[in-house]
Amino acid sequence: MTPYSMQKPNSNAGTTKMRMIASGVAVAAFTIGCTGVIGGASGRESGASAAGATSRTDPNTATPPQTDATGHYALRRLTNQEYTNTVQDLLFTKQAPGATFQESLPGASGYTNDSQTLDISSALVASYYAVATALAKEVIASKGTAGGAYAKLVTCDATQAPCAQQTVSTLAKRALRRPVTATDLDASSGLMAVFSASGTFDQGLYDVIASLLMHPEFLMIPVVDAQSLNPAAIFKLDDYEVASRLSYFLWQSMPDDTLIASADNGTLHEPDVLRTQVTRMLSDARATSLKNVLRDEYAGLLSLTRTDFTQLGQSNALRDSMVGETDAFLADIISNDRSALTLLTSTQSFVNKTLADWYGLSFPAGQGAATFAPLPSTRTGLGAQASVLVNTAGGSPTFTNPIKRGHWLASKLLCINPPPPPPNVPPLPPASQANPTVRERLAAHLSAPACTACHVAMDAVGLGAENYGPFGQWRTAYADQSPVDASGTLPNDGTSNGAAFTDSASMYQALGASQTATTCVALQLMKLALSRDLSAVTDQSVASVLAQSAVTPTSRFSDLIGGVATTQEFLQQTGEAP
Amino acid sequence: MNFKMTRRHLLAASGGFLALPLLESLGGRGALAATMKDPRRLVMIHLPNGTVTRADTPTWFGAPDGPLTADNAPIPLQPFSANLGDITLLKALTQSARDQTLKNGAGGHGGSKPCFFTGQVPANLSTNASGISGDSFDVMYAKTTPNKQNIYLGNSAQGSGDGVAYAYELSHKDGQKVVPQINPVSFYNTYFKDLTGSTTTPPLSDYARNPKILQIPTAATSSLRAQLGKADRVRLDSYLASLSDLEKSLGAQPPVAACTPPGMPSVAASTTNQNGLRGMAYFARMMAFNSLIATAFQCDLFRSVAISFGSEGNYTTYDGVYPAALNYNGASLTIQYDHSVSHHSPISGEAGTYGYEPNMTRDRMHLYVVVDLINKLKAVTDPSGSAVLDNTIIMAGFSVDDGQHDSGPSLGTPMLVAGGKNFMTPGRSFDASPYDLNDLYFTFAGLLGMGLTNFHPIPQTLKPYSKATGRMSGSTVVPL
């Protein structure tokens, strides 16, 4: 069998750019001793920051932050949702086969597309094969149906000889997300050999579909280059690789024809073209997938949607209203291209009648009870929405767990990622005469050296949210009538000295003004775009510079996404040791 | 201890060296015919988060050595009196690898779990891999059954809050942990969708008709591999190995055993349940797995199954929807963390009530699923006419007992062994403290014909002491 040769038919990186990874910009790091800690917005004096700084007033013409370290976008398989979206776009099926695979779980980045956790097992591959043959069968079964999958895939006269290769070639280009080569189609060792084995057009098409759905470049997102084996190399992605990276970032699916056409033109890597494509893609219905990822994995509400509120003494209608608020909030940011800073600072809520009553807001007359209407809110940002507060409260209908809330706030809003608790972590001491309040018990917990480093930051913001009860209602006293003390300071990130707050409302307001938090917004989107955790100082520096121009009151969501998509981290790749 | 080591036990444990005259003593020529003809299977079940066996609480160890009856059944088994003849309770089986792991400083739950199916002391617990080498026992057996898959099922995979090593370090294959399938619909689609009944010759698989369907992706993977760095190559190696497994599976002789193809599990059973509620969706899912296991055994699709009933972490909760008859002493479970229920004392940040009563209710819920599997294996037959259950070893147990977070003295860890009437004598309870979990696996190896001369033998210095036997070097046969 002739070996495949990966080619870059339209590589803008025809001349691989070699650079030694330079020492990064200076970034002040957190001082709390936790691993995975994001630094603040330092590094502004570096060349990298200077480049970003020039763009603050006009992010659309910004030069992407420049650093010499780009990181490695590890080969990964599609997430289950990406698999479903991709086969729906590729084969026009309405099936959601990814839902039957073993669940994709978040990795260190906090997202399910983390390349480090997307393992491949024999069981999963067996599932892939079962689905591949089932989908191929569905395509063939649609033959004769106007507008069906078969009609869309076979656009020529199947009785004519050239039709086979035309059909296979077109399908393969879409499935592999790059131009097909002669090797791909080879009649003895390529897809045309698969096609020809059966002797009939339909059986051949069936076999090719099944084979393509098992192809590594369909199931995975590779970046190849002649310098892939050189760990000192930094090389540019070709435009097709950029197209895939962008479409799986924004749509969790394959590139569409427009994106591929841009790659065909060899212009997709150009910043202006990329920003135009970002704007187009965010306004496309497929951007709903990005909203869903932010809802389920950034806000973390997937587990909430599976929680039976009736077992907690509340109605599932209330649960759905809470999730619906966050869903509508995120959809509004994306579809109306609002500033990403809205995630931290918005005082507008989207509530239906049930949630308005729960919040104590007046629901406008004339609106349907199920309608999510925009209303002024006394809460600030995503983190103060009931859905997030309930989901991070610890699962009890009667008390809140500041550690769990603190973990979410620290990891998602401040990008402080505490490692998993050690196996021998001691339990929180029970309430006692010496330590009657949760704050005092946490303080005692902090006295254990193993706990101190990570809990300092987590507990500060976790306790800062204590004015919100288990179901997100505002409270000033606990059930035993003892007063809630939610005062504190934000973790000291080395640059802001930790803003003080007196209660939960002022804590969320402080978060909205925190440079660390705005940088974290950019970093979260970068993690999602790059499918990996970003703990390197240089990554955080890029995020910091990006946030200064694209997470501001006057910037737009597309500025941030466009900024991410034009970073070197997004457009380049470092090699690996062979 | 009431049971003595017999020649039969020793010979049964010696695997492929079974002598015909002694085999006849197992149950007559009918049983002999069955055992000679029918395949033997293994189901290993890990029950998460330990149980309570303190001296001051009547829980698992009240029954005297001897037959289990409705009058002496321990609390968790009381609702299942009709199945007491199928089950043997091993009281306080020693788990030396676990004990050594805990002495090394690991926490109870996370530290104990990697030891359970492997019988080994993990090299580390500070990363997401325990450093266990080689295979766990279920995989070792699977490797002795050519063309049969080993199946890993579970109610949960690792969740983001489960921490390192807490979740799914049970089965290991070639030194790597194996991720369980948690979705019965996916399991069905993988192994059963195209299965036909015994009266019909299965159609030629697509792969058998046109091997290029997989040969082309395999060649493309190899080509791609050559152009990637080290870590990416590892990922592709995993895919290549999986493709190879798939090709072997598809190329194997199609099953023609006398079996009835199962139906697709209900959509409700497809609901994944990581860190979610454990209500009827949980039971529907686990019992859907049980139905598929029974069919697969009957069709001889695979012979080794490993199951984890849940995460060893904090986050699984109950929702109170389960048969009320399982409640012990009025202790119903509503909003409970599985982890908390296994302890006497409140755990910080975890809701619910504590003590042994809720724990017994929780254990009954586990056994409710185990007994469902027992009955489903009892309802299907092998070619000899023997119940599949009678040719199947089911083991179910915990990797940790009470005392890890509590000062109460623990009496040890219970272990259940069920089925296998054609080569074991279930329906008993006995003090298993002179034996180690690794001895149990060694014994299983003999009964399954694996031909092992030992199974990670516990060093004599660590060996459990028995008045009857003292400390024995090497692996020891447990009288099952």
Image (cartoon, coloured by chain):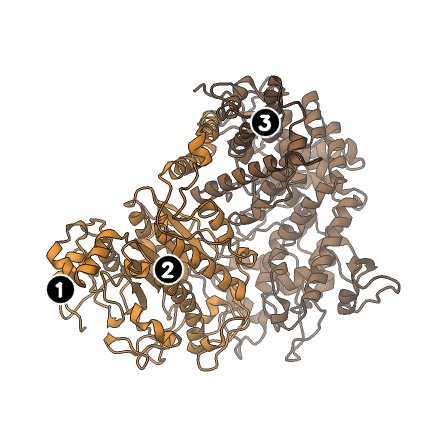
Chain colours: A brown, B orange
User: Given the image, on which type of amino acid does mark 1 rest?
Assistant: Thr
Q: Up-down: is A125 above or below B138?
A: above
Q: Are marks 3 and 2 in contact (CB under 8 Å)?
A: no
User: Given the image, on which type of amino acid does mark 3 rest?
Assistant: Ala
Q: What is the crowding at mark 1: few (fewer than 14 residues within 10 Å), some, or many (at least 20)?
A: few
User: Given the image, on which type of amino acid does mark 2 rest?
Assistant: Ile
Badge 2 is on which residue?
Answer: B45
Residue at x-position 63% and y-position 65%: A463
Q: Are marks 1 and 2 in contact (CB under 8 Å)?
A: no
* Chain ID of residue with mark 3: A
* Chain ID of residue with mark 1: B
Residue at x-position 31% and y-position 66%: B415
Residue at x-position 42% and y-position 33%: B208
Badge 3 is on which residue?
Answer: A172
Badge 1 is on which residue?
Answer: B6
Q: In which quarter of the image is residue B420?
A: bottom left
Give the CA separation, mark 1 to mark 2.
28 Å
- The x and y percentages for residue A303 are 60, 58
* Residues tagged by mark 3 and mark 2 found on one chain of the structure: no
- The x and y percentages for residue B139 are 33, 48
Q: Quick one: A455 or B222, which is closer to the camera?
A: B222
Left/right of residue B24 with respect to residue B305 in the rendered view:
left
